[in-house]
Amino acid sequence: MLNSSGSFAKFATIVHARVIPISQLSGIASLAYNGRVDRANAIRLLKALVAAGANPNTLMVNTWVDDIAHREASLRGTELSSALAYAEGQDWIADGPRQGWTIITREGEKVGRLRIV
């Protein structure tokens, strides 16, 4: 859109913008952050970890966490990364004393023991 001086108006892109439903997006754009999914996946992960014996008094090796996540909660790749990031952001899990170790917090254990119907 040209203005009276012959240059493009700064607002031209806003005038022509339109909303596109997520269902019509393809590729990476449709994989946008979804807090509800991350929360649900984090809870599923905590439930699986607690069922496998995780508690606040026990250190967990990250490879064991990955194995439980894959086998018991069907989480891997970006789903697992997002679930772990969400759980860490909620203080449900934390880094262990050494690299490659994780601990579940008391709050995380409570969340893992919740019975959701």
Image: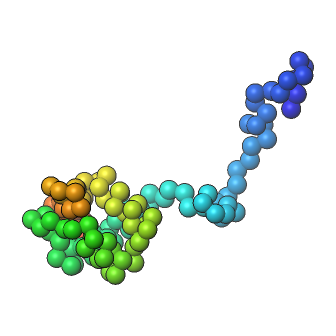
> What residue is at 60 percent from the left and 60 percent from the top?
28
Q: Position of residue 63 (x, y in %)?
A: 27, 71
Whether residue 69 is situated above or below residue 3 in the rendered picture: below
Q: Residue furthest bottom?
A: 71
> What residue is at 40 percent from the left and 73 percent from the top?
75
Can residue 43 be seen here? The reply is yes
Q: Position of residue 11 (x, y in %)?
A: 75, 30
In the image, is 57 to the left or to the right of 25?
Answer: left
| Coloring basis for residues | rainbow
Whether residue 100 is situated above or below residue 11 in the rendered picture: below
Quarter of the image for the C terminus: give it.
Answer: bottom left
Q: Residue furthest left?
A: 57
Can residue 40 be seen here? The reply is no
Q: Quadrant of residue 76?
A: bottom left
In the image, is 68 to the left or to the right of 5?
Answer: left
In the image, is 109 to the left or to the right of 71?
Answer: left
Q: Quadrant of residue 4?
A: top right
Q: Quadrant of residue 80?
A: bottom left
- Closer to the camera in the image, 19 or 70: 70
> What residue is at 56 percent from the left and 61 percent from the top?
31
Q: Residue furthest front?
A: 99
> What residue is at 19 percent from the left and 68 percent from the top?
60
Q: Position of residue 93 (x, y in %)?
A: 24, 59
Quarter of the image for the N terminus: give it.
Answer: top right
State the count of labels. 0
Q: Position of residue 114 (x, y in %)?
A: 24, 71
